[in-house]
Image (cartoon, rainbow, N blue to C red):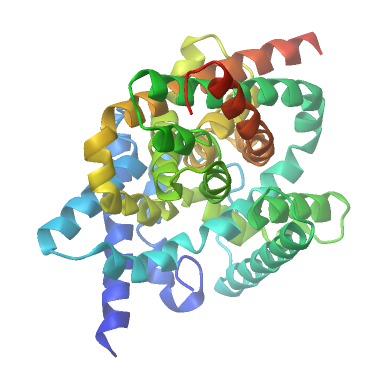
Amino acid sequence: MDSGVLGAMLAVGGTVLVFDLARRLHRRLGWALLHPVLVGIVAVIAALEALGVRYEAYDRGGRWLSFWLGPAVVALGVPLFRQMDQVRRGARALGVSLLAGGAVGIVSSCGVAALLGASPEVVRSLAPRSVTTPIAIEIARRAGGIPSLSAVVVILSGVLGAAVGPALLRAAGVRSRTALGIALGAAAHGVGTARAVEEGEVEAAGAGIAIGLMGVVTAVLTPLVLALLAWLGVAV
Amino acid sequence: MTADGPPDRGDASDPSAPAVAALEAEGMEPAGVRPPRAAWWRHAAGAAVLLAFLLAGDAVATFGRLPLPGSIVGMLLLAAALHFRWMPVAWVEPAAGLLLRHMGLLFVPPGVGLMLQYDLLRREWLPVVAAGAASTVAVLLVVGLLQQRLEARG
């Protein structure tokens, strides 16, 4: 067996092991900010730095795992099918709240970054913050941002939203299970959806549909909001 | 291949079994779609069906020039296929349940890609982190509260 395959298997096995430990720790302690995705990412980075392994070498194995993200998103069709009636009942509300959420997402991320003195390029990269990574990269490219920065922000906010989302929403008085799932999918895309799956099937279905629609809404709104911000003199 | 295929099953699914058991012990359903223990070939067949829907979704998104990734289109196609009974849910259930229960794991490798952005994060970490956090919280609250209010109104 050549060393490339062996290294890749080590990367996969190590990631699975680290993530499993992170998940047990999360259950044991129950601290929201110790979300297993966040702890897993930090622990793997620390291990790679300590061992002097470059990201490209790690990702030759990591890709064997992230490859399954595509089929996992497709698999959300199962809870969506099971909860079709519930989602349909909320359909009109869904259109309105995701339009509002999309606009708030772009304005708040670009606005805060611009006010804190981020470079125009960075501001443009932050516009697609609340959509799933593959869509975010496409939107950033079209808007003149840095696609890899968009990917970073998408993952960071996904982890944050997954970590604090359910507790924050309940504290704010959200009792509807569809609303909770939709908010997680809209604000925290894939990682938030993985969190919604833990909450239950209704939440999973809401999150799955919200990711898709949020992508469309943000793709359409991004150029409009950036033009508006430029007109207001906030960002270029 | 890894997360599901028969050759590596020990690697990918064993560590998770205690985790699922822990969730059950807490009286929680780990995922909405938890199947009974299914034979490996049912997982493999389900994975093949999911991959086929992913390919179909990619094709529709590319040729239809949709502003959506193929996986989202594939999700909608799968829900439609199940809804209109073109295909029984049992075909995909074991594989779908396995992938959804461990979805978080799949985000770790792309997240480790943060390593490549040290320079940029060092220069502009404050606006990036503050904007990401503020906007995540804002969208959570706006969508959650608005959705709940509109649902209640019917």
At 48% from the left and 50% from the top, the residue drawn is: B103
Q: Is residue A32 visible?
A: no
A16 left or right, relative to B70: left
Name the spot of residue A57 as percent of width and height, x first: 27, 70
- Image quadrant containing the N terminus of chain A: bottom left
Q: How many marks?
A: 0
Task: Return the residue found at the far left.
Answer: A50
B139 left or right, relative to A205: left
Q: Is residue A74 above or below residue A51?
A: above
Name the spot of residue A30 as percent of width and height, x first: 31, 29
Name the spot of residue A109 as percent of width and height, x first: 46, 25
Q: Is residue B23 visible?
A: yes
At 67% from the left and 57% from the top, the residue drawn is: B70
At 40% from the left and 52% from the top, the residue drawn is: B105
Task: Return the residue found at the far bottom.
Answer: A1
For this rendering, which residue is in front, B102 or A106? A106
For this rendering, which residue is in front, A214 or A43? A214
At 32% from the left and 36% from the top, the residue drawn is: A27
Q: Is residue B135 above or below residue A216?
A: above
Q: Quadrant of residue B143?
A: top right
Q: Quadrant of residue A100?
A: top right
Q: Quadrant of residue B109?
A: bottom left
Name the spot of residue B108 as percent of width and height, x first: 36, 52
Q: Is residue B1 above or below residue A62?
A: below
For this rendering, which residue is in front, A164 or B131? B131
